[in-house]
Image (cartoon, rainbow, N blue to C red):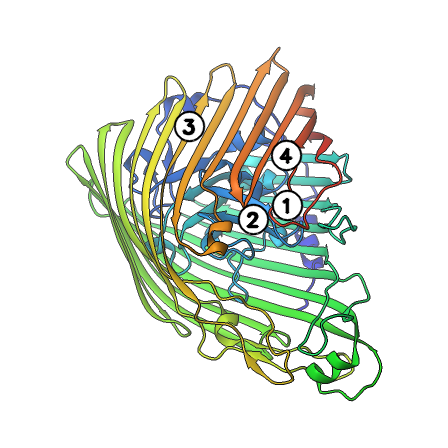
Amino acid sequence: MKGMGFQWIAVGVLVCGNVLAEANEDAFGRELSFAGYDSFLSAIPVVVTPSKMPQPRVNVSSTLSVLDGEFIRRINMQYVEDLLQFVPGFSVAPFKTSSQKIVSYHGTQLDEYRRIQVLVNGRSVYSAGLARVEWATLPLNIEDVARVEVNRGPNAASYGINSFFAVVNIITRTPLETLGSSVSAYSGSRGDYRLFGQQSRLSDEWSYRASASINSVQGFDEDASGRPRHDGHRSVMGNVVMQKDMSNRSFDIDMGASQLRDRVEPSQYVSNRSRSGNYDTNQPMRLVDREHIKLAYRQQLSADHEIKLQYYYDQSDLNEYHEVLLTPEFYNEVFGGVSAVNVNKAYSVDLFETRHDLELQSDWKASERLRVISSLGYRWDEADSDLYLSGKAGDEVFRGSSNLEYLLGDDWVLNTGAMLERSQMGGTFFSPKLGATYKLSERESVRMNVSQAVRTPDISDQFFRWRYTLTSGEVSTTSYALNGEKSEEITSYEMGYFHYWPSQGVSLDLKFYHDKVQDMVLSKKHFSALFGADRPIQEGVVEDVTIRGAEIELDWRFRSGAMARVTYAYQDTQTQNASLLESTTPNMMSLFGSVPFADVWAVNGYYFYADKLANKNYQFLNTWLSYRLTLGGYSKATLGIGMEARLDKNALVRKHNNLADDRFAYVFTNITF
């Protein structure tokens, strides 16, 4: 499937895009609805992430945050990952470039964060070649998202290896929820813009949705010395979902593709004998093509038993091209050349990652008090890179899990489970969890949970053979993995309290936790063969870390249509390691409010604060005014204007991430028909 390109997604768009269907009033992403709170005000919320089964939130023993569709439509975010700023303990910020956003929980790493699991409709988007979540390449538009559930704590018992600090489960809307057509546009005074289009239709038992977007971000303006940055990115992405619903079974296809063009800062190179004068002479671009397809089949075997079979394939193809000027000292030492003068050369950065995943799941209601979810799965990850691996390397994982909910009388709920995994690369792992919930009422509960999880090294950690191959054929010395890295292990203890007042539209959640992490990998993965000979890459630098803290979140919905959300997180990271402390923040807070008036206007805003993130305070404020109007029939439009401001006057996480102006204005619109 390598090289099949972006064009195939356009075929799906055309197939689904021939007929316009009528839309209901609240079907689309940017449309503001000032009513529609009946479900929140009267029903106990139901969640699916902790044990992969629908459960009333009051029964759950794990700590969970839910960002529902109404919140997502009101918050006026352009990208899905930015929503996680409104989950306690989460930070979202770019590091090296504006496209490489790092979404972290509990911190511990500023770049290429690797300690959370991210799922989109049950499909893991965690990349195992160079462990990370590449948010900018996900073929996922925020308008298609129905809700985001975040399990704030380890949950390897349900989701396996790398479900370490948290699990982010992004659930998209079905085509039946988005019937009709919608277009959105956003433009900012810094030159950022975004265009989105969507169309859904129904035909007999089949329903379809096709959506696509063009996104452009100008990026950072200046480095720490005031020199212009070569930053910013542009992406195109599309997604097609097709579903067939029958009386006792269903089948769905989800396919998507994206293209990213990312400006990369020119690099400088040093060796033992040449400390300066080696640098890129071009303005490099990082090009990433990403594609996926997912097939899922559900069969209701009886009123109490359902099975699901799911397969997905994901691929990512990354390329960079660098033209370089090298001094004779560097060229001769690193590439074994023979030159007395500077040389002009070129090389490429390449990484092709693929994943095949197959899972069979059984959902069995054994009795009125016992429900069991069991699954068997297989995954094959492979990375192909001449630069990082000098070829191909992969990992094969077999897994089996079982999770249950058992009602002990009217007040106690037992939630327990475990997963057994066999990794060809890392060995065998057993990840259990045990949770108990005491229901003070049908809307109020106290919970306790203990869980264990493992984060295995990525493919590159174990198989690094890092070398540079010039287009003229010369090959550099090699940095190589000698023994690889150990697996990280976590044991997490948490207690929490949840209370839901439906008549007042208030939801409150408290969490207290104590996490013990063993063998947290702190090795720096840099090219080390700079002395005219092959050398092992740094590995085996680990530390045991204890993290403890408290988190609170409050949701408040009013029958008038107003809404508010408040989150706060306190974290105490017990370590003397300076880089670990730099990547954590002891205090984080977010506030959001939206107040409608005169039926068609709304005043909205949010505020975010992080204390000592990369040793700097980070805070910003965003406010906007929106107006809703009816165009006739089912057609509606929303218009808005807003302003965002950084309030801290600091570089963003990294000293080279600076904007020329910390304030910018923007306009946006959405039309549904």
Q: Earlier in the sequence, mark 4 or mark 2?
A: 4
**Location of mark 2 (residue):** 242
**Quarter of the image where the N terminus is located:** bottom right
**Location of mark 4 (residue):** 180
SS at circle 1: strand
Q: Earlier in the sequence, mark 1 or mark 4?
A: 4
Direction top: furthest residue: 598
Instruction: Give the answer, above or below, for where 337 lies relative to 521.
Output: below
Q: Nearer the viewer, mark 4 or mark 3?
A: 3
Q: In this rendering, does residue 672 appear at all?
A: no
**Quarter of the image where the C terminus is located:** top right
Q: Residues within 10 Å of mark 2 (few under 14, many from 20)?
A: many
Q: Earlier in the sequence, mark 1 or mark 3?
A: 1
Gap in Å between the C-alphas at discs 1 and 3? 35 Å
Gap in Å between the C-alphas at discs 1 and 2? 9 Å
What residue sits 45% from the left and 74% below the top? 484
What residue type is disc 4 on?
A: Gly
Residue 555: quadrant of the picture: top left
Q: Earlier in the sequence, mark 4 or mark 3?
A: 4
